[in-house]
Image (tube, rainbow, N blue to C red):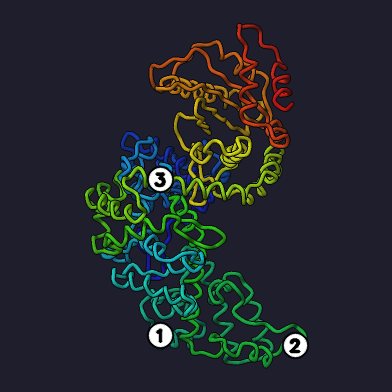
Amino acid sequence: MKLKNESSVLNFGDTSFRRKKYMSEYRTVLGILARHMANNQTWVKNQESQSEFYSTVVETTDLFNRSEESDSKLAKRGRTLTNSIVKTGLIDEKRKISDAGYAWLNNNLAERDTFEKVLDISDDNLIFFRQWSKVRLYNVDGDHYIKPFLFLLKFLSVYKRVPQDDLLKLLHLLSPNLNDSEMNRIIKSYKHVSNNEMIFSEYVEKYINTDREKTINSNKINELFSESPIDKNEFNEYFKNGKSIDKAGQIYLNFVESLLSFKNNPNNVTLVELIKVSKNEKVKKAFGNGSNPFVIPKVHDLSVESFNEKNQENALLHGNNIDIYNTFKISKLNDLIKEYGDMTYRLTNLAGIISYDNKLVDLPLQLYFAAFFKKFNIDLSGDEPYADYDGNLHSMLYANESFTTSLGLEKHQVNLMLKEFMSELNLTNINELIIHFRNENDKRFKEMVQKKFPKAIVIRLLKDFVTRNNDSEIKKLVSENAPIADIFEYILGICWFYISEGKVNIRKSFKMSLDANFLPLSHAAGYQGDIELRYKKKTVLLEATLMGKSTQKRGELEPVIRHTVNLTAEDNELSEPRTTQTIFVASELDDNVINIFRSTNFIELHHSVNNKTVNGVNIFALSITDIINILNEGVSDNKIVTTINDNLMQIPSIIRTGWRDNIVSDILN
């Protein structure tokens, strides 16, 4: 990515596509774009193509409910919708899908290198870890860059529990003109904050150059402000506001003119007008860091004298004209950082590597990354031209390559680093290291579940899933970064954590991507089911849906049977075959669907991607209310599965509605 102008800051996303469920929605949009761009479709300067793409998104997804009438507006929506995906390297500026993009869509990522195998993250996490690691922030001229995500990883490999607001501000203050020496100095100098030797604002003032724009001569501002009226076009050259300059520029001008009028002629009339315009939200962002630029006395005490007394340190009132401009620059910069900070958190969170928890940021694998950055002098900046990297679809940015390959590291170098790191942990091989971190993650996951999702909270959430009138509370209690349907799938897994009393590894059973705090991001694509619970001699497949009765047959019948057949066939091929039990869970159950599930026990069925067949499958259905009762009664996983299998039909016969009721009663009693 490249800065548009000197006042711009790092932005991993795009303000025209502000989302919370980036993982699932990026995949959706990318899939539609891939189909659209097939057959050498042209995108650049092709409004018809852009308009057609956006129309398809609106018609086939629930991402947007807005509709546009003109092709030009539809085309603009198509461009802005995909701007943020361009920055990932999954597509280029011409909207051509990259090798990395196709690999993600087709579940065909390059094989994990040895370093990546230790990370214990999903393929969805992995693609973003790889891509963010390759992303560069170029200066306006496109001849120098920094690597913000690698800087972030290196910074967090040194410091723990960094305040999220401070870290995001630091990241967005980085200039793309910095060199490696300067960036490493910024990292090293943060020790003064970490050791409580200075506060963060002092650190920024001392070690970070926040003046992103060329220095403006104070005489030019004096000349501009001396005009009456102030020239609007010239004013807008200095007091910029990006896309909304026509609207915001006039508001800024009104404020500055009112400010100058009060400073030149302080009286009640000019004071009242200044206070009035200072309350505008755009003025607050541009001149007051999000708050009113002034401390305003109460109405009964309002006077020029009281106003000046309460604002005697205010540079807008008592400084020079250049101070008005400098206040604007700083406030706008802080506003941009605040605006983009949330997107940066959500998008870097997709990598599943960085923990954002209670407004503190950590690297759970800090020791691992610390050893990596200690062993290798990873470049954090460089001079390769923007056109040769972001502008070249064959560059490493767009390649389907592993993390260490993209950094130019040889396999033997990485293996040596791993060997040295393992020796510190008294481990002898890579498999032991992988297991070591998996065990640590399992322990952290268990602690998280017990703390964040005690059984009472889980039951409360299940009740909300039944009524579906409190989705906002569900997101608040679980995560805002995943769709409700995926959150239900996740909570069903947590239910089984309690039902199984920890006998089965729930974290590894999820077929979904989690963040570094083990909260849901998105269901993983593929031909597998939702949650595969691996026991010693059996596999239990949990299939979750919030579809109502009217849509279950169309939306769930085929996938649930297909997933069950695939899993059963694969379990049958193991050296020690397992029995396979599917449990379908929904808020309400359609009788036709559960009756058909019952009948599949007597049907020969075929694997969806190979020639394997199975002589029937075992699918049982439970409602969310059934799961609540199971949790309340403390019913074990073994009793559930045993009761279901004890009541399997032995001879084909008519399946009559209501057959399930006695089995559920036996489970609960």
Q: Quadrant of residue 234?
A: bottom left
Residue at 43%, 50% in the rendered image: 351
Residue 10 percent location from the top left of the image: 41, 63
Q: Quadrant of residue 574?
A: top left
Q: Label 1 crowding class (10 Å Cα cut-off): few <14, some 14-19, many 20+?
A: few
Q: Amino acid at mark 1?
A: Lys
Task: Pick whichever of labels 1 and 2 is earlier in the sequence.
Answer: 1
Q: Amino acid at mark 2?
A: Asp
Distance CA(mark 3)–CA(mark 1): 42 Å
Label 1, on which residue? 220
Drawn side of residue 21 relative to residue 550, left or right:
left
Distance CA(mark 1)–CA(mark 2): 38 Å
Which dot, 1 or 2, sits closer to the camera? 2
Q: Nearer the viewer, residue 497 or 461?
A: 497
Label 2, on which residue? 301
Residue 517 percent location from the top left of the image: 52, 51
Label 3, on which residue? 47
Determine whether 622 is above or below 631 in the image: above
Determine whether 387 is above or below 540 in the image: below
Are discs 3 and 1 less than 8 Å apart at CB?
Answer: no
* Secondary-structure class at tag 2: helix
